[in-house]
Image: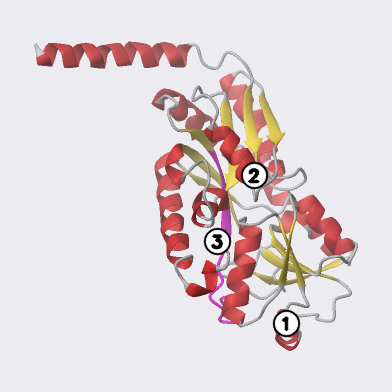
Amino acid sequence: MKRSFTAFLAATWIVFSGAALAAWPERPIRIIVPYGPGGSDAQIRLVTPNMQKILGQPFVVENRAGGGATIGTAAVRASAPDGYTLLYTGTAPLTVAPHMRPLSYKLEDFQPIGNVTGTALIVVARADAPYKTIGELIEYAKANPTRVNFASNGVGTTTHIVGEVLQLQAGIKFTHVPHTGLAQVVGALLNQSSDLVIGIPGSFMSQINAGKLRALASTGNSRSPFLPAAPSLKADLGLDVIEETKFGLLAPKGVPAEIIDALAKALQSSMKDEDFVSKMRNSFITPHYLNPREFAAELEKENKYWQAMFARPEFKSLKE
């Protein structure tokens, strides 16, 4: 009797999930990006046209910034697990922010669909700053504690936390100035209300090429292919600061496995498109696909790293 009931449940689930997939998607799929416009949202906007062709419904990208990328992330957590609301984010809101303060979500509340990019960040200063190299920046910051205004995407974002690690490793201290998006950050450097930022190359290359901003270093294991003259903090300076930041697509927990699989296959196929790869590289972004299992493993690895980092005395002051 027990076996029959178990078989009945299994058969019911197969019918239910198959019906759910057959009916999905029936309407546009919304992707929430928890940052301001003009930054990482450009990445997912490049891949969604191909996904739309595969799945037959439009994708609507919505910027919902604030709270160090936690507001938009929490909104996806609170959405119905039906495959119509997804999250495109860097890993920090999931693996860093929950260790800093109480939030309405945790890493386990999301299902990875696939990672899209893995790009080393760059350290950028305004062109008229009194330091022209990363070495000069460190010397200046040591001689002038808190004098350097360090802009970020918001408290707890990758652009903030990597800066904290740089300060720790170099023995210096900045004054942190949080914003809600990279467009604001760029504006802060250009109007001289901030001096320094760490972020993805694509957000700064036009200003760097125009001589309005200056690239000082890269956070990759080696020099950035987009800025080969800028030294690697790790390889060239010996500082233990490595961040090849990942941005990926996730769904709230509870979305049927068949829908996750369909989204993952559409994402993977779209990322193989030559036009997509060319546009990404022209935008100074490195495509880096990870399937759901690989992305989940990477997130868990990062989560454990930051959990240990925030247990250090130097990072306890960052907790709210």
Q: Amino acid at mark 1?
A: Pro
- Name the mark on residue 1: none
User: Horizontal and vertical percent for residue 69?
Assistant: 64, 47
Q: Are marks 2 and 3 in contact (CB under 8 Å)?
A: no
Q: What stretch of residues is rendered in magenta?
A: 234-249
Residue 192 visible in the current orientation: yes
Q: Secondary structure at mark 2?
A: helix
Q: Is residue 296 a member of the stretch shown in magenta?
A: no
> Which of the 4 quarters of the picture holds residue 73?
top right
- Residue 145 place in picture, x, y as percent: 72, 82
Image quadrant where one finds the C terminus: bottom right
Q: In front: 196, or 103? A: 103
Which is in the foreground here, disc 2 or disc 3? 3
Residue 310 lies left or right of residue 59; in this view the side is: left
**Most common secondary structure along the magenta stretch:** loop
Distance CA(mark 2)–CA(mark 3): 39 Å
Image-quadrant location for residue 226 = bottom right
| Residue at which label 1 appears | 145
Question: Image point 55% across, 27% down: which residue?
Answer: 79
Which numbered disc flags the more N-terminal residue, 1 or 3? 1
Whether the magenta-drawn stretch holds residue 244 is answered as: yes
The reply to whether callout 1 and callout 3 are in contact (CB within 8 Å) is no
Tag 3, which secondary structure?
loop
Q: Relative to residue 290, is residue 48 depicted above or below?
A: above
For disc 2, the marked residue is 277
Q: Amino acid at mark 2?
A: Val
Circle 3 residue: 319
* Number of numbered markers: 3
Q: Residues within 10 Å of mark 3 (few under 14, many from 20)?
A: few
